């Protein structure tokens, strides 16, 4: 077999630790954290990470390091950042809970010369598998990905995920959401998928997912109105995947964790057709 020399910068495997009641914010549009990620763990809370480009963490090595790790944390806001050329996960939650986490207006750029799927895309985008995770993914641009966008859930862990107004672009051979455990509940609204082979991947042990399309059934519409006190907002795809509506599960049990919550906790998305322009014009550093 042909042998290849692969270097490893050990800084990438030793992330910066951030404590409670801290804001890590980049100054200016070009603020960059290069070669090293950030970890919050051990019960810390009330953390903000904003306006940074986190990049060049051993992109050639799968286990070379993660951009942001959350393990046993609460109340974290990850906002207006850009992620690129990361060895493993862009965001990963550990076995401890990651509760009340919002990732908003971030660019997750999966373009890489080290593609595990040999198509120029990154596979390990977002892995959310904590014991009792609760996440909102809002207005993010996730592009050139092979999978795990995001992957949620694992055995003996629960997950409540609200995905709203995210722009998923270019996964011609890959998948977006992979809800991989029956204890996972995902409500996906107002998201736009462009050239994505499988917006939602259905596994042998799938999570409970409601990802409505335009023309949703009366039963789905009624369930949304009862749980959210408003209609669910449809997702859109261009082109529609080969499996059509089967790529957008409509399991109304996914509404249970969101039922009766306020509009602040479960905000109302805008129409999916507006997502590509709105999101691409406003994500990442320099757009605060």
Image (cartoon, helix red, strand yellow):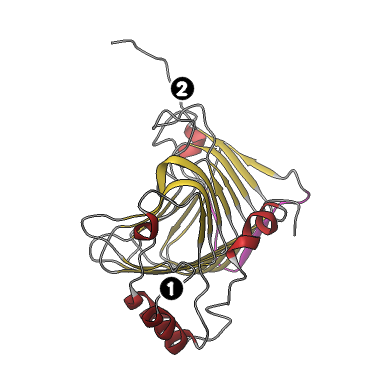
- Tell me residue 198's x, y (percent): 39, 49
- Tell me residue 200's x, y (percent): 38, 56
Reply above or below: 86 against 165. Answer: above
Quote the CA–CA distance across marks 1 and 2: 51 Å
Seen from the viewer's position, the closer of residues 42 and 61 is 61
- Element under disc 1: loop
Q: Which residue range is magenta in the image?
A: 16-28
Name the residue beneath numbered marker 2. 7
Name the residue beneath numbered marker 1. 216
In the rendered image, the residue lying farthest to the top is 2
Residue at x-position 52% and y-position 78%:
266
Mark 1 or mark 2, earlier in chain: 2
Residue at x-position 69% and y-position 55%:
277
> Would you call the spot at circle 2 few (<14 residues within 10 Å), some (14-19), or many (20 or more)?
few
> Would you call the spot at circle 1 few (<14 residues within 10 Å), some (14-19), or many (20 or more)?
some
Q: Is 69 positioned to the left or the right of 49 in the image?
A: left
- Residue 105 sits in which quadrant? bottom right
- Tell me residue 179's x, y (percent): 33, 59
Residue at x-position 53% and y-position 85%:
230
Q: Is 282 positioned to the left or the right of 228 in the image?
A: right
Quarter of the image containing the N terminus? top left
């Amino acid at each position: 077999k042909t042998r290849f020399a692969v270097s490893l910068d050990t800084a990438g495997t030793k992330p910066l630790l951030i404590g409670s009641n801290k804001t890590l914010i980049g100054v200016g549009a070009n603020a960059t954290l290069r070669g090293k990620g950030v970890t919050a763990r051990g019960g810390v809370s009330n953390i903000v990470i904003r306006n940074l480009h986190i990049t060049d963490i051993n992109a050639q090595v799968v286990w070379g390091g993660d951009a942001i790790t959350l393990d046993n944390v609460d109340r974290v806001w990850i906002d207006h950042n850009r992620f690129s050329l990361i060895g493993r996960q862009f965001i990963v939650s550990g076995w401890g809970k990651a509760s009340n986490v919002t990732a908003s207006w971030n660019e997750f750029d999966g373009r890489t010369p080290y593609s595990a799927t040999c198509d120029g895309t990154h596979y390990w985008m977002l892995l959310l598998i904590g014991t009792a995770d609760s996440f909102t993914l809002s207005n993010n641009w996730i592009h050139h990905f092979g999978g795990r966008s995001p992957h949620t859930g694992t055995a003996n862990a629960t997950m409540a995920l609200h995905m709203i107004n995210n722009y998923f672009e270019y996964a011609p051979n890959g998948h977006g959401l992979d809800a991989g455990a029956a204890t996972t509940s995902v409500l996906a609204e107002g998201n736009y998928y462009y050239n994505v082979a499988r917006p939602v991947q259905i596994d042998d042990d799938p999570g409970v997912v409601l990802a409505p399309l335009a023309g949703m059934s009366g039963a789905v519409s009624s369930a949304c109105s009862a749980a959210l006190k408003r209609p669910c907002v449809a997702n859109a795809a261009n082109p529609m995947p080969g499996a059509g509506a089967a790529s957008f599960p409509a399991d109304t049990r996914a509404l249970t964790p969101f039922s009766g919550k306020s509009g602040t906790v479960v905000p109302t998305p805008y129409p999916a057709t507006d997502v590509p322009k709105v999101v691409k014009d406003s994500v990442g550093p320099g757009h605060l």
